[in-house]
Every structure is written in C-alpha cells, then in structure tokens.
Image (spheres, rainbow, N blue to C red):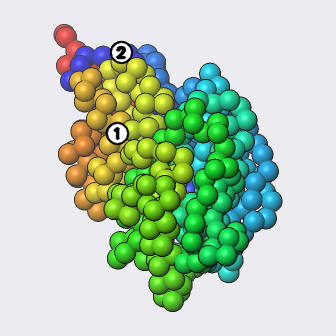
Amino acid sequence: MKRTFTQIAIAPNAFKGTLTAAEAARCLERGLKKALPGASFVIVPMADGGEGTALAVVKATGGRWVRCSVADPLGRRIKAQFGLSGDGRMAIVEMASASGLILLRPQERNPLLTTTRGTGELVRAALDHHVTRLLIGIGGSATNDGGMGMARALGVRFLDARGRELPEGGGSLGRLARIDTSGLDPRLQKVTVEVACDVTNPLFGPRGAARVYGPQKGATPAMVKRLDAGLRRLAAIIRRDLGIDVARLPGAGAAGGLGAGLVAFLNGQMRPGVDIVMDAVDLTGKLAGCDLVITGEGCLDGQTVFGKAPAGVAKVAKQLGLPVIAICGSLGADAAKAAEAGIDACFSALEGPIPESELAQCAAGMLERCAEQVGRVLALGLASIAPP
C-alpha cells in the first residue's frame, strides 16, 4: 500500500433507479472527505453504454444538452435530448430517450407497431450541429423493427412488392421487398458512428432479438414468431440490396435489431459501451497521477466482470498500477468475481432490509456514510505504516 492518498479518482457507474453516476460520485466524495480531509479528488462519472452514457460524456467533456421534438415508439411527438461534447464535434444519443420502453405504459407495449423513428430524428438533429462523430447507446428499447424507423427518418425507403412504403413497426418487415438508400442523408458519409452494444445476440433465431427480448416488450408467442420472421426477411434484403451480411453479426439483435440497422444503414461500428465511454472521457488521462481509484454501481455481482463500468475502470487502473475499491449499493451473487476484473475490495452501502420504494430516498445518505467508513479504514491503514 502507498503511504499517502493525496489524489483519489472517483469513477462510479449510475446506481440504477436511485442515483446518476454524477450524483453517486458526489456522495462518495463527501464521505471520503470526512475521513481523508487532506486528499483531493478527480471526479469521472462513468457509464457502460446504457442509461447515463450521454450524461457521463457530456459532463466529462464540458458539453451541453440539445432538446428537440421526436416521435416516441408509437409515433407521438415528445421532447427528447441528445448530448454535444464540449468541442461540439461529437453527439451522444441514447436511443431510449426517443424509442425506449420507459416511454410506454404497460398496456401500450406492442413491438409489432413500435418504431425507432425518433432515434433517427435525434441523429438527424445532431447532424444539423455539424458533428463528425456519433456515439449511440442502444439499451432499453421498446422496439423490434430492425432499425427501419431510424433509417427511414434519415431518408431510407422500405418498400413492399408493389413499391409502397411499409408501415412503421416490426410487424410489417415480413412484407419487405426492397430497400432504397438513394435518399440517405449524405452528411452521414462524413460522420463516424460508434454503437455502444453490450450484448452479442444475433438478429434472429433462438437467441435473436424477438425471441429473447420480445416478450418484455409486449410480444405474445405468436407475435414473437412473426417478428423473428420479419427480422430474418430484413437480413436477407439487406444482404441482397446493400451487400452487407448482418445475419451472423454479434450484437445485431440488440435493441430489437437496431444494432443491425445502424451497421447496415449508418456504417456503424459496434463496440463495448464501456470502452466507448472510457475513450470519450479520457479515463486513462484522468486516472494518471492518482493514488487510488474508487468505483461502484447499484449492484455488483458476477456479471460485473462482463463489460460493466466498474470492470472497465479497474482495467485502466491496473494498467496504471493503481489499487481499486468498489463501493456499491449491494453485493449480489458471485460478487467475489470482481477480483478477476482487478477490483481489490468491494463494499455494500446497504444498511438493512429497505423496501425498494424507499431506496431512492435513502441511497445518497447510505452511500456517503459507507464511503466515510471506507475512508476511515484507509486512514487507519496509513497510520499503521507511518514511520515512528
């Protein structure tokens, strides 16, 4: 252990449903300051491609938000937003803000009808700001349209055998006969598109978008079968008309096939979300010169090592030779596997059996108090190795 912790990096993920990554970071900072008053802190809110990705990048780059009117999953006009980096060259889009399941009441969920058009409208609005790079997070979708709505908002036409435009929604893909990309927004040729994708599901089949994720979006078994056939048809037409094979592409099934659509129509490159965020916020540069790294998330468990933000933070920290502590809301099954990701110790902030409905009110205080106790342990360790 080093003899001093003069500079500590705080780089947590969001505590889903209770605290944003930035809020969690401030709670951790307040608690640690009480026990380590001489330390300085580097705050780096993190994300792994899902909820909070845009917020993390906007804050880290000194960027801003842009609000615009878009279609929700059922075509109703709503206000959504995307982020612009501090230098104005990069836009960060979370598809869930326009096409997310959270925008629908349970009785409205129907992936035969829901569309990603609003996500395409966010992209189009970002192009109006002359960006050269697009980061698109594709978690939390309400859709199963293979990105058809997104691409249509950017000028692509999806035609049936009579040359008519298909209706919105994944339920019409089985009638797809031709894709016309001649009207695709030409500005996309000058933009690099990166897709934050943390699943490897193919577009269709037993592990495809419809069968794995369709039921949570409101699909019945009969609807799942129809949606899966539609995505299979979409892949065949994309291969014939565009010369791109998305059928076997890992991650093509993400967000109801939006992963496939972004690759096929926007030349998107799929990458683990945490890698995209780490690059965007310059995590390596932020951690350089620190003595210790504190990370965390709502629940740390065996899945954390598979592309979650704390694992990504730990990977960078270990490359710099830094110790890593995770302070989390709770510790789940196989939390000990966090050591495999380079997390040296992990702590739960949960102070007792608290009803889920009360967590939002209690989370900040519990996290701050836990951070203070971790800081006191660190202070004791430093005192025990201090020279006489």
Question: How dense is the environment of label 1, judged by Cα within 10 Å: few (below 14), some, or many (20 and up)?
Answer: many
Q: In the rendered structure, find residue 289 and report the number of the disc placed on it.
A: 2
Residue sitting at x 44%, y 72% = 232
Quarter of the image holding residue 89?
A: top right
Q: Amino acid under label 2?
A: Gly
Q: Circle 2 — which element?
A: loop
Q: Are marks 2 and 1 in contact (CB under 8 Å)?
A: no
Up the image or down, 214 lies above or below 336; here it is below
Foreground residue among 95 and 11: 95
Quarter of the image holding residue 60?
A: top right
Marks 2 and 1, the one that precedes in the sequence: 2
Foreground residue among 84 and 384: 84
Left or right: residue 198 versus residue 340 is right
Residue sitting at x 57%, y 66% = 178
Q: Amino acid under label 1?
A: Gly
Location of the C terminus (image quadrant): top left
Residue 305 x/y as whole percent: 29, 49
- Residue to which mark 1 is pinned: 312
Residue sitting at x 78%, y 46% = 68
Residue found at the far top of this picture: 388
Look at the image and tell me whether residue 299 can be seen: no
Residue sitting at x 32%, y 20% = 291
Residue 298 x/y as whole percent: 45, 52
Look at the image and tell me whether residue 314 can be seen: yes
Left or right: residue 311 versus residue 232 is left
Left or right: residue 199 versus residue 136 is left
Foreground residue among 317 and 63: 63
Residue 191 x/y as whole percent: 56, 34
Inter-mark Cα distance, 2 to 1: 18 Å
